[in-house]
């Protein structure tokens, strides 16, 4: 029994290393390829045992696996985990079982339980890390005193032509890069929904509240292999898009507080009060139309009270750079 427990503890360590590595970009891992391969071989050995759990003899596939060069190279690791089965030559053993017998149903159940537990813990750990990373990205923008001004975002005056060109470019690039993945559609629909709602309210601000997992989980749950490996990049670009024309009104709870209360952190954003409806029309035109989005808008919209936020100061565009509104195509051009 003590030997079985020692085997299970070593197996648990290999499972932990395997799942943590497999859920992380290879270039970000300190584990060597050889160590990762050993973990993979150990899990493969368990899988063969589980497949043949009701068989009295080792299957042909299991024998082929155990006699393979890769299994022989990792025989020491397999033995340390209690998963090494020595195959006798066919002529000397009808059962195919030598010095190390096949594991009992009860022991195999313990192995499977440990494997599933380590896989679940690895997923939970990665989810928490992504939540923390998202919070850091948003807080960095919120705490940057130079990012938001009365009529500025970053280095731009929000009523200027240069600002409009900038934010349209940010939205256009993000949409073109991620609109092909269904996992991003609820976020894109949410941005569109906020803008359209705000264009219909000229005085008060509309706040969009959404769950942090909208950004922290999409790239990892996505069916697109390219997006599975760029979670941090996706989150950063999404936050850059939001803060290019919105203000983070509140982070409902910190990640740690939300974890203690067993729910996801929430974030609330509203459009900068000095952005006009006309500019918002240009911005929303860079997003996919709702008919091309295969998900409903994430989060919820609510009208903010005057005590929560100042009213819109340029809804009708009276302070906009008028050069951006001149219909040049209506003027004749005479070539001299």
Image (spheres, rainbow, N blue to C red):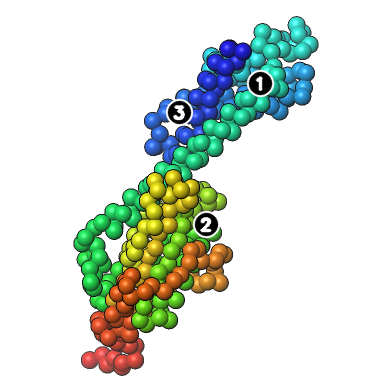
Place of residue 298 in the rendered image (x, y in percent of width and height, measured from the top left) = 50, 63
Place of residue 119 in the rendered image (x, y in percent of width and height, measured from the top left) = 54, 35
Dot 3 surroundings within 10 Å: few (below 14), some, or many (20 or more)? few
The residue wearing badge 1 is 107
What residue is shown at x 54% (from left), y 37% (from top)? 120
The residue wearing badge 2 is 183
Lower position in the chain sequence, tag 3 or tag 1 = 3
Can residue 279 be seen here? The reply is: no
Dot 1 surroundings within 10 Å: few (below 14), some, or many (20 or more)? few
Lower position in the chain sequence, tag 1 or tag 2 = 1
Dividing the image into 4 quarters, which one contains the C terminus?
bottom left
The residue positioned farthest toward the top in the image shown: 92
Q: Nearer the viewer's eye, disc 2 or disc 3? A: 2
In which image quadrant can residue 172 be found? bottom left
What residue is shown at x 46% (from left), y 44% (from top)? 127
The residue wearing badge 3 is 33
171 lies above or below 55: below
234 lies above or below 308: above
Q: Nearer the viewer's eye, disc 1 or disc 2? A: 1
> How many numbered marks appear?
3
Check if mark 3's residue and mark 1's residue have beta carbons within 8 Å.
no
274 lies above or below 228: below
Dividing the image into 4 quarters, which one contains the N terminus?
top right
């Amino acid at each position: 029994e003590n030997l079985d427990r020692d085997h299970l503890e070593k197996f648990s360590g290999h499972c932990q290393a395997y799942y943590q590595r497999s859920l992380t970009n290879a270039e970000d891992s300190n584990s060597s390829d050889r160590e990762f391969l050993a973990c993979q071989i150990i899990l493969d050995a368990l899988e063969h045992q589980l497949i043949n759990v009701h068989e009295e003899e080792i299957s042909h596939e299991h024998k082929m696996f155990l006699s393979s060069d890769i299994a022989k190279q990792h025989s020491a690791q397999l033995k340390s985990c209690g998963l090494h089965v020595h195959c006798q030559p066919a002529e000397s053993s009808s059962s195919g079982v030598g010095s190390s017998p096949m594991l009992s149903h009860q022991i195999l159940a313990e192995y499977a339980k440990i494997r599933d537990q380590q896989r679940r813990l690895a997923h939970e750990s990665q989810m928490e890390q992504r939540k923390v990373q998202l919070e850091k990205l948003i807080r960095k923008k919120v705490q940057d005193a130079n990012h938001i001004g009365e009529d500025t975002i970053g280095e731009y005056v929000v009523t200027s032509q240069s600002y409009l060109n900038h934010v349209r470019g940010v939205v256009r690039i993000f949409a073109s890069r991620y609109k092909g993945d269904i996992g991003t559609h609820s976020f894109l629909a949410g941005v569109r929904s906020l803008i359209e709602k705000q264009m219909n309210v000229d005085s008060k601000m509309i706040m969009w509240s959404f769950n942090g997992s909208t950004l922290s989980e999409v790239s990892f749950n996505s069916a697109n292999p390219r997006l599975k490996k760029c979670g941090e990049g996706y989150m950063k670009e999404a936050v850059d898009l939001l803060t290019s024309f919105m203000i983070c009104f509140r982070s409902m709870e910190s990640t740690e507080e939300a974890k203690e209360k067993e729910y996801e952190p929430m974030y609330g954003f509203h459009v900068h009060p000095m952005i006009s409806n006309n500019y918002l029309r240009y911005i929303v035109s860079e997003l996919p139309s709702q008919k091309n989005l295969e998900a409903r808008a994430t989060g919820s919209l609510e009208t903010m009270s005057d005590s929560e936020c100042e009213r819109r100061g340029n809804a009708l565009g009276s302070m906009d750079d008028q050069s951006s509104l001149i219909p040049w195509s209506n003027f004749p051009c005479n070539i001299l």
